[in-house]
Amino acid sequence: MEKHIIIFNKVSKEYFAVVSLNALDQIDSTFFITKTVEFDDTTHEWDGGNFDDGQVIVKGSSNITAIESTLDQQCGKSITDVYKTHHELNAIIDVLKEIIEKENLSSDAVDKFKAITQFIDTRRILNERYKSAYQNDPNFNYITKEQEQEAIDRLYDGGLYEKLNNSM
């Protein structure tokens, strides 16, 4: 068993951190209050509770916390891992174009939509021209998306990618 310093926000009394007894003189009492608690940190931990209600518990005995914003971020990432934002927008644009054409719709909103899609179409044509120019110019080393991914795969081969991802 060893003594630990539990640090709390001085105003709200909300839990901030657990530090070793050696750090006591490093804590700024302008912002923090502390509580000294004795426990074996290999088997026990602070439950994350505030100054008044927090306690030492057996490791792993507390409920798992699910944070809504984290779940939303993970959901968004799982969608964009499969369908990048531009793929999603392209699908919507294609459907809207069909509806507008089939229903012969006209309005200021339709005109604005057509202007946006015309701009996008023009930028795509220009992008294809840029790609072609770079590919055919001996002064440039053009790297395709596939070649770029292959280089990344080679760089992180042998489990390095997984090791780096798990340590973050």
Image: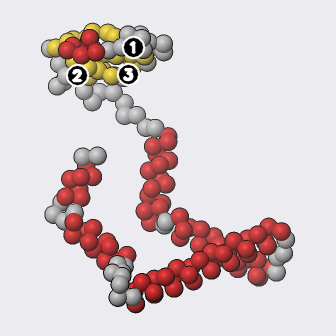
Could you tell which of marks 2 and 1 lies nearer the N-terminus? Answer: 1
Q: Is residue 129 left or right of residue 37?
A: right
Q: Amino acid at mark 3?
A: Phe
Give the residue type that dot 2 points to.
His
Residue holding disc 1? 32
- In the image, residue 64 above or below residue 74: above
Identity, as a three-letter code, of the amino acid under mark 1: Phe
Q: Residue furthest bottom?
A: 136
Nearer-N-terminus badge (3/1): 3
Residue 91's spot in the image, x, y percent? 59, 72
Query: Cα distance, mark 3 to mark 1?
Result: 9 Å
92 shown above or below 139? above
Q: Are marks 3 and 1 in contact (CB under 8 Å)?
A: yes
Tell me residue 143's x, y (percent): 34, 78
User: Is residue 53 visible to us here?
Assistant: no
Compared with 136, 114 (above or below) is above
Q: Which residue is mark 2?
A: 44
Q: Is residue 137 left or right of residue 123?
A: left
What is the quadrant of residue 145 in the picture? bottom left
Q: CA distance from mark 2 to mark 1?
A: 23 Å
Q: Residue at x 20, y 53 (%)?
A: 163
